Image (tube, grey):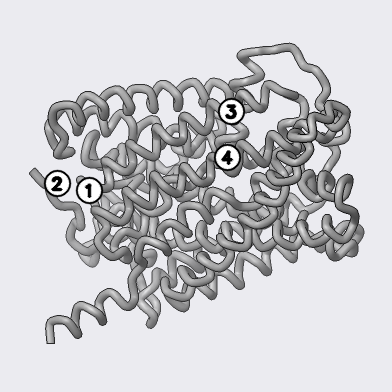
Amino acid sequence: MNNSNDKSARAGKMGFWMCLALVVGNIIGSGVFLLPASLAPYGLNSVFGWMVTAAGALLLAYVFARLARAYPQAGGPYVYPRAAFGELAGFLMAWGYWVSTWVGNTAIAIGSVASLAELIPALKTTVGAPAFTACALIWILTFLNWRGVQYAGAFQIVTTVLKLLPLTAVIILGCSLFIDQDAAVIRVEPQPFSFPAIAAAAALTLWALLGLESATVPSDDVIDPQRTIPRATIIGTLIAAVVYVAASTTVILLIPGTELAESNAPFADVVRIFWGDRAASTLALFAFISGVGALNGWILVQGEIPRVLAREGVFPVIFARTSKHGTPGAALCITSALATPVVLMNYSDSMVKIFTFIILIATAAFLVMYLLCSLAALKLAWRGELGVQGTKFVVLLVVATLAAAYSLWTLYGAGAEAVGWCMALLAGGLPVYFWMKWRRSPLAAPSTLSDPPA
């Protein structure tokens, strides 16, 4: 009888492979397929930016893994700052994370449509077609997530496997060319070495690695979250970092910067040069699948964060309403409804310009959250609430300090404008917080936070 109940409870939850697919799938999306165009002005400085970002992402992954082990509750970006610095800090980080998620989803959808336009040229020439196609993608995947975490998780595994294929193909292409030692294939235009350029490139490349914390958000739907989430977070971040650095460096080296800056599908352009139009079209299809997979995972996340806040009584209670399938139906629909006009308002601009502008603002908000979570890990570890002692304690202090320093440095690279927009975004949450604090809903569920293990 107990075994039957246990199986039934686990049936609707995510295991390690689904969590790994969520992390890798949310990290590897449409971003990497458009990002080389945004990085073109930085030349080889962008390669160093990638390396810094990969190292920083792994530091952050370790921090989130430690936090998730001690605090396995759903809503990581809210739970950790709240535990260390109080309810207001937790709310502001969750608010910024939530808004950045659905705003960033518009960039993912637009990037996915840019790849689809390689297969359907009418999308490039028909006014408004990219925007309406992007909106359709958002709502189709919102429905999939409304149907249940198992459907969304299975879809995530399939798309994650498929999205790795084109990146692996480009890596193989680059390796084969470089092994032949043909220097003529290297077309990168020389750029002076510059720390500001590396910092700016690191801010852009971090967009492509955002999502390393994804598995910490829906932890209520995860089997054995204290073990599953840390493993999925670290392994998933490592896989994505290796693939990203190798694939993106190949593109940057093989296409001149002036051409790369004008490209709407840099990876397809590389494949077209060496393998022809048919191969480029095939890669564009996989790039589209990659973006759709990432959009699916982020839509799952965008529904969970407001549901957690609503359960805590710091967000309107409507966001806590669940569908008949047990999913955050109201939160999913409201958030996707907010994302829709963002796409429609920007459809007349070039895809790369929209992409670059949105990712800088969203990245800045993520960086503030990463910074506060790193500081939270330091404070909680120092108070003895993360269950680490001896060498592990020292390692965590060093890693969390480096992760905080990396977040600050990359915030500098994002620039004053992006940071200013980020601060405005966070400030926009204050009226909501104080309004909810004033009229704390009696229907709000009791706190889901619990004390960490000793």
Q: Residues within 10 Å of mark 3 (few under 14, many from 20)?
A: many
Element type where label 4 sits in the image: helix
Q: Nearer the viewer, residue 357 or 263?
A: 263
Q: Residues within 10 Å of mark 1 (few under 14, many from 20)?
A: many
Residue annotated with mark 1: 71
Closer to the chain start, of discs 3 and 1, is: 1
Q: Does 434 sit left or right of 330 as displayed? A: left
Closer to the chain start, of discs 2 and 3, is: 3
Q: Residue at x 26, y 81 (%)?
A: 8
- What is the distance, in whole Å, between disc 2 and disc 3 at their CAs? 34 Å
- CB atoms of marks 1 and 2 within 8 Å: yes
Q: Residue at x 61, y 52 (%)?
A: 29
- What is the distance, in whole Å, between disc 1 and disc 4 at their CAs? 26 Å
Q: Which mark is residue 452?
A: 2
Q: Amino acid at mark 3?
A: Ala
Q: Does 163 sit left or right of 323 as displayed? A: right
Locate residue 329, reporting x and y percent.
43, 72
Residue annotated with mark 4: 207
